[in-house]
Image: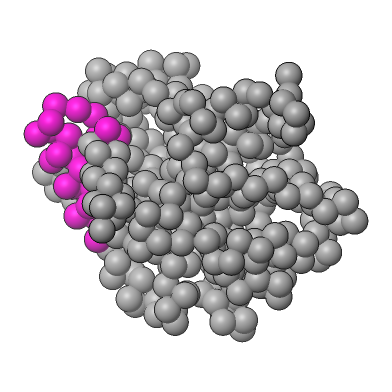
Amino acid sequence: MTDVTGVPVDVLRTLFHSDQGGHEQVVICQDRASGLKAVIALHSTALGPALGGTRFYPYASEEEAVADALNLSRGMSYKNAMAGLDHGGGKAVIIGDPARIKSEELLLAYGRFVASLGGRYVTACDVGTYVADMDVVARECRWTTGRSPENGGAGDSSVLTAFGVFQGMRASAQHLWGDPTLRGRKVGVAGVGKVGHHLVEHLLSDGAEVVVTDVREESVRRITDLHPEVSVAVDTDALIRTEGLDIYAPCALGGALNDASVPVLTAKVVCGAANNQLAHPGVEKDLADRSVLYAPDYVVNAGGVIQVADELHGFDFDRCKAKATKIFDTTLAIFARAKADGIPPAAAADRIAEQRMADARRR
């Protein structure tokens, strides 16, 4: 069912009446000449211009794309708040298979739509988009980050994303085992693409035993060719059931923690780079009931957004790395708040982020 505008009624109901709503602005973009179909969602600008990446993905339906944009943009509000950035949350999704329809014409058209928002939304890379794509988008839109150094940007943000996740793991180890090292711990990494393969390097350097899996055989081979000591699980289901696993790191798409995976998870800690790891509200309690420590995804994977935000002020890698290092302290503070309030860490992180946004609105 649609309303008079042709927008599905369930989308409007989500926007205006559900817990997933509360968004300030949602823009539906279409450029017939290039084939562009995109959704730009601005959840909040309380702390400043909305900042978040552009996901290019072959969604099964337009409704699924809108839902993803809404969820991801809301997550960016919380991520940016917890990272201490003066940015609100936004996200964009481009509908389609990037291997088939991505073109210069399409990216330029997308850049014009972002530019039309006049700086309320700052875009960057995400799944399916890369530094070279942002260089093209930037030709039409100055509110573009994640560009190449040759074009005034910081380059690949996955380096600091992985570094931040590693800091979150160190904090988790400190909280649970009293020592911030991963030495001797068995860590399972699901997804060793842009972020995951950098994370593996940090883990190995710290003395961890690493098990990996990925749907792309070439990604796994890149790891094992360099590090034959790394073990390989046939798939994610096998990885999460691995005997003796200490830490599980979901580093692919969202929804990794769900009603099927949580009951069979052998790890004592979940800390990974993927966005929206909790498949639905209540999963965080299921983890807590099983005494699994969950490091909130949007807190530990904030290294990338810290990097792209810094581009707007003249990029300095050392300054960004220093900020990303603080993810260790932020994660520990969340665990302490969770213990004090008697709630799961995900709920504690939400409370802290919501307080910062509420304080900004009152100013």
Magenta region includes residue 340: yes
- Residue at the image position 44 percent from the left and 49 percent from the top: 44
From the top left corner, tell me how far across and down residue 258 is, in percent. Answer: 45, 22
Answer above or below: position of 94 versus 232.
below
Left or right of residue 140, residue 331 in this image: left
Q: Where residue 235 appears, x then y in whole percent?
A: 56, 30
* Residue at 66% over, 24% down: 9
Pick the quarter of the image with the C terminus. bottom left
Specify the quadrant of the image occupied by residue 211.
Answer: top left
Q: Looking at the picture, does residue 332 appear above or below residue 264? A: below
Magenta-tinted stretch: 326-347
From what the image shows, is residue 129 above or below residue 176? below
Q: Can the viewer see residue 270 in this picture?
A: yes
Whether the magenta-drawn stretch holds residue 84 is answered as no
Q: Depth check: 181 or 352 in front?
A: 352
* Image side of residue 172 versus residue 116, left or right: left
Query: Above or below — where is 109 with respect to 352?
Result: below
State the residue in front, 208 or 344.
Answer: 344
In the image, what residue occupies the spot 61% across and 61% down? 117
Residue 40 percent location from the top left of the image: 62, 49
* Of 73 and 153, the residue lying toward us: 73
Q: Is residue 214 visible?
A: no
Q: In percent of the image, x 39 and y 23: which residue is there? A: 281
Classified by dominant secondary structure, the portion drawn in magenta counts as: helix
Exactly how many numbered labels are in the figure? 0
Rendering quarter of residue 293: top left
